[in-house]
Amino acid sequence: MLLDSLNKKKTTRDLGKNIFSIMLIIFIGFILVIRYNSINVNTEQVALFGIYYCFATIVFIISKLLFKNVINPLSIYTVFLFLLSFSFIVLSIEQSPYSIKTFLIINFSVFFYILFSIIDFPTTPVKLPQFDNELKRIFIYAIILVAFLTFISECSMFGYIPILNISTLDIYNDTNSKLIPFLHYFITLLGFMPAWLYIYLKQELITKKEFKYLLLLTIFILLNYLSKQVYLMMMMSFFMTYSYYNKVNFKLIFKWIIVFVLVLGGAIFLRFNSNTEIPFAEYFRAVAGIENEDVSATEALVVEYSSKRFTVLNEVVETKDKTEFYGFGTYTLRPILSLLFIEKIGLVHRPPELDSEKKVATFMADPYIDFGLIGVVILNSFYGYIARRYYKQYRQNKIEAVIKFAIIIFCIVMGMFVNFYNTMFIWMGLLFNKFLLGGIKTYKE
């Protein structure tokens, strides 16, 4: 009786939280619609914003009802959907309305990802050669050793250790031009290493002393390369792994994230105001190409780093149609082409005006450039399928799926910028994750 009573209270409490979060999202949307009408945004744009905002809200509600978990294949995708809805509000002179073809690509991408992330397909594990525990130890040491030797070799090419010259040189641009082909990927693999090491520690494959020294070496090497993407992947994969083994107070983490964002934002604001007489909001409006003085600094930032990406997508789509170019897999299978040096010897060619990575045209561009609308349907269906597959394995407490699902979260979060699904960083991460963690039994199983 007592247990039933506690379960009912928990269910009621969870229901109350869900209703509150949904009502808050609806209220924010309502306020934004009123705001954009008041600053004379085109009525059609406000209507499109409202429609897609409501759609994103519905998807969020479905994610809560279907998966009953905060982090799931749909909930992480709703962040992208809310940003998509905002992109219909044209605030910058650098934005443009979407063509019918771009509109189709966006909607097909969204529909087929959602559809295949909802369908619960039966899954058969992918079997690769599995190492015994001693070989796993040797393998993880080998990865770190190759990364360290690559780091030493690259430092000799740089002529310095980057972290020791971080305040005097343009480290990022200078080092990026001198990286060793392919071998440098072992350094990017270190983005997964803290999570792998923590799993090995918990499974007693390495000692605490080994964990500390290897972790310090990993972090030291990564600090010499200013790769925000690798740092983000490192934080995501380690957090997912830590929360797998330990009870995490998500409320406390959320509060600390808010405090961190506020402190960081305040520091940036104060530093900016101390160095220039231009108001903070005015500066970012200028950067984003916004002439309307009623637009806030926050909105200008969203326009610059989100909404304008969809405009670039639209430009890439129009260029692809005008040139009648088809990549036939040269974008989707980029890691294989890189591994075989096919690009280096000039057997394949990607026009500079269709370089979706440099142009930062969102993850929606590559499938269309490669295969047209059929590619949009097939590849986004695949993205939804693997998101659901890895999530299902994650919920079944399969330890290798912890990293795999973290990778999916990363790809979706970065989808606003470029397509990380077709990068060597992600492909190698998945492959080495299978070798290192395949067959490991945890106490949760």
Image (cartoon, rainbow, N blue to C red):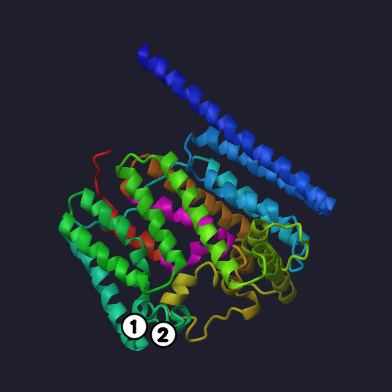
Q: Residue furthest top?
A: 1
Q: Nearer the viewer, residue 89 or 127?
A: 89
Nearer to me, 370 or 241:
241
Callout 2 secondary element:
loop
Q: Is residue 228 visible?
A: yes
Residue 159: horizontal and vertical position, in percent? 34, 88
Residue sitting at x 28%, y 54%? 437
Determine if the magenta segment contains residue 417.
yes
Asked whether disc 2 touches disc 1, contact meaning CB atoms under 8 Å apart, the reply is yes
Q: Is residue 199 magenta?
A: no
345 shown above or below 284: below
Instruction: Work out how far the residue at label 2 is from the one at label 1, CA to CA, in angstroms.
Output: 7 Å
Task: Give the left or right position of residue 143, taking residue 417 as reference.
Answer: left
Q: Is residue 411 above or below residue 117?
A: below
Tell whether 219 sits left or right of 5: left
Which quadrant: the C terminus?
A: top left
Please name the residue that numbered disc 2 is placed on. Answer: 178
Disc 2 marks which amino acid? Lys
Dominant SS of magenta comes to: helix
Mark 2 closeness class: few <14, some 14–19, many ≥20 residues within 10 Å: few
Residue 136 appears in the picture as rendered: no
Q: Nearer the viewer, residue 62 or 19?
A: 19
Residue to which mark 1 is pinned: 154
